[in-house]
Image: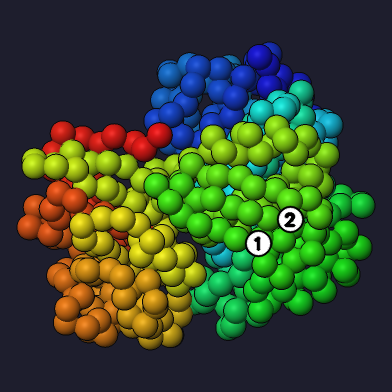
Amino acid sequence: MTLWTASEAAEATGGQAVGDWQASGVSIDTRTIAPGDLFVALKAARDGHDFVAQALEKGAGAALVAHIPEGVAEDAPLLVVEDVQTALEALGRAARARTQARVVAVTGSVGKTSTKEMLATMLGAQGRTHASVASYNNHWGVPLTLARMPRETEFAVIEIGMNHPGEIAPLARQARPDVVMVTTVAPAHLEAFDSIAAIAREKASIVEGLEPGGTAVLNADIEEAPILRAAADTAGARIVEFGHEAREFKLLQTGVQDGMTRVSALCDDRETDFTLNTAGTHFAMNALGALACCATLGADAAAALRALERWTPFRGRGQRERIALPGGMAELIDDSYNANPASMAATLATLAAADGARRIAILGDMKELGPQAEAMHADLACHEGIDAVDKVHCIGPLMRALHAALPETRRGDWSETSQEIAERLQALVKPGDIVLVKGSLSMDLATVVDALRKMGNGAEPDA
């Protein structure tokens, strides 16, 4: 399948094509590049121009560059532009403009990626669906996702994130969604924002990209809901809400049993019961919002529900696994990809509801919380989910505050790094335990997860 021809890409970006090439994909990483991809030489931690020759050797169809790199022939298949990032954004806008896809964009402090994956599963069951890969939700991730979108796409799901003020609205304008969803607003990135209200205003700015007549799907249960509603009203959006306090998609009851979450809701006044193939009441809320998005997009509700019941979270985002240890099985809740106070509270509640001989939490620092970071870590000791945890092991300088605040009966080990805890796991985890691993990505909790998997005979992902 041809995604871009040289002439199409040149017209979209205003660049100069060298050669009459075709590209079947778009890539920014030579480690995962596929033959036929257009390699985009972005400048990030390293300059992508340094890898153009390698990309072409691996079979890239062409490279998007600001100049011909050293070691690359002048007649090599290239698209030469003034600025690579700007050209990638132009390519994404052109891809969006040429498709008739119905687009939903998802943002929020917690649950963006899992909700995006739910939507991709639900919509993928009833039409050609394109979605963001992993957490490609920033200034390069959104245009890259758009640039990869085939023109025959029927549904698209775009994840939009932020670290600083003013980031979401420009990305939303590139995506031009028909529907936007805000999963929730919670303390995250407080180093760049002076309040949760400021975070809410930034999340709400996603409505600035809505197509005329578009819909905002909003969480009705959060204190910042009025801020979201006001922004949607100003944008002229139709508002659909989800949550316990919502009228349109009202969450009635949730329960966790046998590693699954059973949900009862009213969806546009219709009683709806469904089961998620994972444990966690926070997943139920996101699923209800995803159902609201599907209904607003005109998707078939029954087909969406059937697909939703097949969905399971990705590794690092709440996936549950059985780990074979000498002498028996342990269970792992792998939520090691990211953390903030809201997601930590939700996952602790999941651990508290789980059945196991012992409930063990291995928690790493939550980053980007600003001057109240230590207090927010210590406050976790008061979370009701902690009362059901037998031992809490802490990793990182900020988690030292939680370690000190825990009662002695629940206070486990503290270490500076994940590697130190990983080396002591055999003394900390026993057969019959259920183990939660969670922290911010930079804490490298994946080291602990990998060490758990290696303790016995490997993992059995839950069905």
Which residue does the numbered mark 1 point to in the structure image? 252
Q: Position of residue 460 (x, y in %)?
A: 29, 34
- 54 to the left or right of 400: right
Residue closer to the observer: 348 or 93: 348
Query: Residue at left 12%, top 59%?
Result: 428
The residue pinned by badge 2 equals: 266
Look at the numbered disc 2 and give the secondary structure of its residue. Answer: strand
Q: Quadrant of residue 24?
A: top right
Image coords of residue 19 (percent x, y): 65, 15
Mark 2 crowdedness (10 Å alpha carbons): few <14, some 14-19, many ≥20: many
Q: Nearer the viewer, residue 207 or 241?
A: 241
| Amino acid type, residue under disc 1 in the picture | Leu
Q: Quadrant of the N terminus?
A: top right
Q: Is residue 435 left or right of residue 244?
A: left
Position of the C terminus, as image quadrant, is top left
Q: Earlier in the sequence, mark 2 or mark 1?
A: 1
**Image position of 37 with respect to 185: above or below:** above
Tag 2 and tag 1, C-beta contact below 8 Å: yes
Q: CA distance from mark 2 to mark 1?
A: 7 Å
| Left or right: 139, with 280 as reference point | right
What residue lies at 21% left-to-right and 69% top-to-bottom? 391
